[in-house]
Image: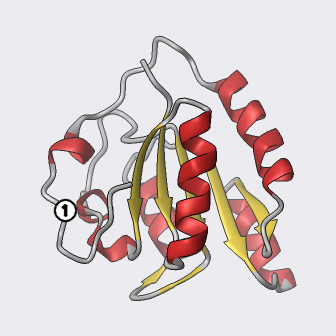
Amino acid sequence: MKIRAMVFVENLFLRSKLNELLSRRGYEIVAFSNPADCMLLHNNTCHYACTDILICDLPMPNVTMFQAIEKNLRTGCRIRNVALLSEDWSPEEVAHARKVSCKLFKKPLHFGELGLWLDECENRINPQRLLSDELLQAKAPQSSTFL
């Protein structure tokens, strides 16, 4: 089974560059310009992880990513590899990210550093894991972009 990555990045150029990197690694990729468009963020229960890796901008339209991640963890979300991207990290955000076990990356993004983190993620991912196909079956709203 391919590794699945979900990307929530508003900037089209950065989202495209992330897509290139993840595609070269052989990942299945689902990308959104706005996380509010992802049907699974509105789901209240998780039976299986919907993705192996989640990469998202911290400042996103219509959604506070920390709140979304915390809500999903409370309702049983099984995504264990989460990276947050931001141009600037306050001490409170750093502490909050550690609390919810997120990896922080400062923009401009250094793809070599991200690649090392992806290597670590790949080593943690059980090849026999089950992934939910709800993500692939859900109809994407028009503002979403699947790369």
Image location of residue 43, percent across then percent down: 24, 58
Circle 1 crowding by C-alpha within 10 Å: few under 14, some 14–19, many from 20:
some
Residue 60: tell me if it is visible: yes
> Which residue is found at the position 34% from the left and 33% from the top?
48
Secondary structure beneath dot 1 equals loop
Quarter of the C terminus within the rendering:
bottom left
Give the color scheme: rainbow, by chain, secondary structure or one colour: secondary structure
Quarter of the N terminus within the rendering:
top left
Foreground residue among 76 and 90 = 90
- Does residue 50 lie above or below 56 as drawn? above
> Which residue is found at the position 52% from the left and 14% from the top?
127
> Which residue is found at the position 77% from the left and 83% from the top?
87
Residue 98: tell me if it is visible: no
Image location of residue 106, percent across then percent down: 81, 72
- Does residue 32 lie above or below 45 as drawn? below
Quadrant in which residue 86 is drawn: bottom right
Foreground residue among 112 and 51 = 112
Image location of residue 30, percent across then percent down: 38, 51
- Does residue 46 lie above or below 9 as drawn? above
Q: Is residue 140 left or right of residue 73?
A: left
Query: Which residue bears the numbered disc 1?
Result: 140
Q: How many numbered badges does the structure rendering display?
A: 1
What residue type is disc 1 on? Ala
Image location of residue 36, percent across then percent down: 32, 75
Q: Is residue 118 left or right of residue 55?
A: right
- Does residue 86 lie above or below 146 as drawn? below
Quadrant in which residue 29 is drawn: top left
